[in-house]
Amino acid sequence: MSITSTASTPSFNAVSLRQDAGVIGLVGLAHMISHFSQLLLAPLFPWLKEEFAVSYAQLGFLMTIFFIVSCAVQALSGFWVDRFGPRPILFAGLSLLGVAAFGYSISTSYWMLAGFAVLAGVGNGVFHPVDYTLINRKVSAPRLGHAYSFHGISGSLGWALAPAMLVPLAIMFSWRVALMGAGTLAFVVLAVLMLNRSKFDLPAVAPKQADSEATTEGTFTFLRIPAVWMCFVFFFLYAVIISVVQAFAPEAARQLHGVPMTLAAMCLTVYMVCSAGGMVLGGFLASDPARCERVVGMAFGVAAGVALLIGFGPVPGLAVPALFGVMGFATGISGPSRDLLVKKSTPENATGRVYGIVYSGLDIGQALAPLFFGTLMDHGQYRGVWLGLVAAQGLLVLSAFNVRRVRRTALATMASA
């Protein structure tokens, strides 16, 4: 009789956990740099305004350039990811963000900044197709919700890190040194990912399966799936909400309720921190794919109710940051289920393309929302800003359930055929 010892052999679940954790952690690290790079210029606007003798509108246009370019590249990069794999596209994107940060730091004119904003937009546009292809193809199904949760948290941390790092460096040294530091961080992360590049290899597709997919699924077939375009609309609305909260909602609340300046400045930080906490809970709720639409609907329903209260209720100024926290927590809960919503609408062989098109809605929303809501702010329509935020949240709830309806209709049609 022989005795087989398993003490030295790790269980499948332990191996799978290590593999999943490695992929999730590295993808989250890259996603953090993407969000970090979106806010390289905004915290430094006071320095840049003085250095280049330009208006805030001109500086804001640099962000518009960034997101328009990112939108176009995001739609295209999904095709590149499906064709060449995510690893070279990810490394190229991080490299471009690092080069753009150093480029900002040596700029001697406004138009040099604009040129490097184009380069940064190209680099930023690759991340969502890369990230979600890796997560959906490499992470085991029971941990997908947690993977989406960590991915969202890492993005929020990137947004929080940018001003926390750049402003102190600009105060202590200069805005150029701050941007050099940002570029250095991007290249350090790139080095970490390159040292772990084997974790970004995708499992090979069987030849017969590949041949079948090539003959039955055209490159652009996924564009005929109605649920894909409903997801695009969903993310456009989500981007409008994020843009309003980041740029205008704290000041609009301050004007409406007499919030002290220091507390108003805390509103966005409270929102982001609570959003990250909500994403942790949302990762557990997303463990059941069947309820993702309900989770999104209820979460944004709560967020819309809080926004309506801030915009039109008799709210004490001291309570406003706490209400931002509730709104952020509710929004964070929806994050993993939101990503699962897209996965359920994505053909297996078109992950990069679908996520590229769908997430380009984020860039379009972030490019257009400031134009509309900034005009409301310029005219003192502070309640209008909050009403617009409530409307976007309400439409987002409807679009989430419409995605489910469209997807079920398509499945019923296929079954009857």
Image: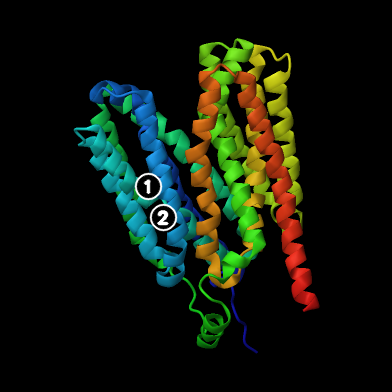
Q: Position of residue 44 (x, y in %)?
A: 34, 27
Q: In the rendered view, would you say 2 is above or below 81? A: below
Circle 1 residue: 121
Q: Residue at x 55, y 80 (%)?
A: 213
What is the three-letter code of the residue carrying label 1? Gly
Q: In the rendered view, would you say 363 is above or below 200? A: above
Q: Residues within 10 Å of mark 2 (few under 14, many from 20)?
A: many
Q: Residues within 10 Å of mark 1 (few under 14, many from 20)?
A: many
Circle 2 residue: 73
What is the three-letter code of the residue carrying label 2? Val
Q: Residue at x 29, y 24 (%)?
A: 54
Q: Position of residue 250 (x, y in %)?
A: 56, 22
SS of the residue under disc 1: helix
Q: Residue at x 68, y 27 (%)?
A: 307
- Residue 327 visible in the snapshot: yes
Q: Earlier in the sequence, mark 2 or mark 1?
A: 2
